[in-house]
Image (spheres, rainbow, N blue to C red):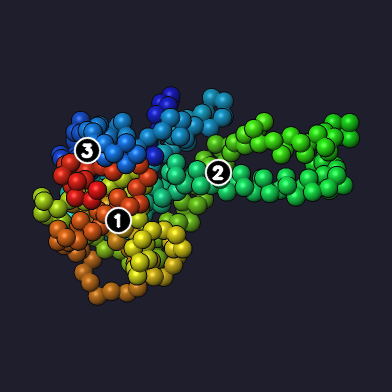
């Protein structure tokens, strides 16, 4: 059983596809948007967060991390095969890749933070409504099964709630860990309804980059961000860099294009800028020069 505490939300096998050779010891170039700085790193040391998948189940704290490691063991060969042969994946392999895309889109610190804020807002509004009157407050306490002698006096509870410096609301890690699995399955099925194309660049001067949030969802008419666009919207595109030379593009409409499309340098740069725009903090590439082109 693994007791690893450094959990990757961007898989190491995936990041290796953006190094020069793809080998485990190879370095990847990183640009940190917050620090406005470059550095070289092993894929092992980026795209991770301490205890990201850890749960409070005694003796099985890392069970989710171990299950994800098993899944990555199945997905890594699919990526390697696709990268090696540069052909559009078969249905089974495509489903595996789309599952991985869904995982990256959902199991991410940015998404968790947004979900935390949403739940905290709901909790705050619920308590605000509960404390609108003493009668409502007491009724809610009784419905919750709190014995009369243990109910905190109304004015005391209201004073405590209104002083935000006295408490902090935390979202239990298990809410994320177990809630995400159902969302990932739903998103994968939704992605399966898109028409996918494999984008290929053979030019050493034009390589795809990736990031700590590598799934870009945009409107076909306005490539400015995710706001107002959903994965089920008919006029949206999903772009995902598979490796430094391959990427996937998913749309809903039918197309007579070949499933494999060779992309010129100017288009690669445009797609890299989109990856940069959707990144949270870090962008990854095999060469520093490819990062310079999008900053």
Q: 270 and 246: which one is in front?
A: 270
Q: Is residue 119 or residue 95 the one in the foreground?
A: 119
* Residue at the spot 79% in from the left edge and 49% down from the top edge: 132
Q: To which quarter of the image does residue 87 belong?
A: bottom left
Disc 1, SS: helix
Mark before the other along the chain sequence, 1 or 3? 3
Of helix, strand and loop, which one carries label 2?
Answer: helix
Residue 190 seen in the current view: no
* Rendered position, 195 above or below 203: below
Instruction: Say if mark 3 contacts mark 2, CB within 8 Å.
Output: no
293 w.r.t. 233: above or below: above
For this view, does 241 lie left or right of residue 191? Answer: left
Neighbours of disc 1 within 10 Å: few (<14), some (14-19), many (20+): many
| Residue carrying label 2 | 116
Q: Cβ–Cβ below 8 Å for labels 1 and 2?
A: no
Mark 3–mark 2 distance (CA, rounded to whole Å)? 31 Å
Q: Name the residue under label 1.
A: 274
Q: Residue 96, percent across and down?
A: 35, 51
Q: Which residue is drawn at 43% across and 29% down?
A: 50
Report which residue position mark 3 lands on: 29
State the image coordinates of residue 238 (x, y, percent, origin top left): 35, 60
Q: Is residue 37 visible?
A: yes
Nearer-N-terminus badge (3/2): 3
């Amino acid at each position: 059983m693994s007791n690893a505490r450094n959990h990757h939300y961007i898989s190491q096998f995936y990041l290796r596809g953006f190094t020069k050779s793809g080998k485990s010891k190879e370095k990847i170039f990183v640009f940190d948007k917050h620090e406005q700085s470059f550095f070289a790193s092993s894929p092992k040391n980026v795209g991770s967060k301490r205890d990201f998948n850890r749960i409070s189940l005694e003796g099985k704290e890392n069970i989710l991390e171990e299950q994800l490691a098993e899944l990555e063991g199945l997905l890594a060969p699919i990526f390697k095969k696709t990268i090696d042969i540069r052909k559009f994946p078969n249905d089974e392999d495509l489903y595996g890749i789309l599952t991985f895309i869904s995982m990256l889109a959902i199991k991410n610190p940015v998404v968790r933070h947004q979900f935390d804020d949403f739940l905290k807002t709901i909790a705050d509004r619920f308590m605000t409504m509960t404390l609108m009157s003493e009668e409502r407050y007491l009724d809610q306490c009784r419905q919750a099964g709190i014995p009369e002698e243990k109910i905190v006096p109304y004015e005391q509870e209201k004073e405590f709630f209104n002083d935000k410096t006295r408490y902090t609301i935390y979202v239990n890690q298990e809410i994320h860990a177990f809630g995400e699995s159902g969302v990932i399955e739903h998103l994968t099925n939704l992605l399966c309804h898109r028409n996918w194309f494999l984008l290929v660049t053979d030019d050493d001067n034009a390589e795809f980059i990736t990031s700590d949030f590598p799934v870009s969802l945009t409107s076909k008419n306005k490539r400015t961000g995710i706001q107002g666009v959903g994965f089920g919207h008919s006029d949206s595109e999903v772009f995902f860099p598979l490796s430094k030379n391959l990427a996937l593009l998913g749309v809903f409409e039918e197309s007579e294009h070949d499933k494999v499309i060779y992309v010129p340098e100017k288009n690669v740069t445009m797609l890299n800028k989109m990856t940069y725009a959707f990144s949270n903090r870090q962008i990854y590439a095999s060469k520093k020069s490819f990062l310079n082109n999008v900053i």
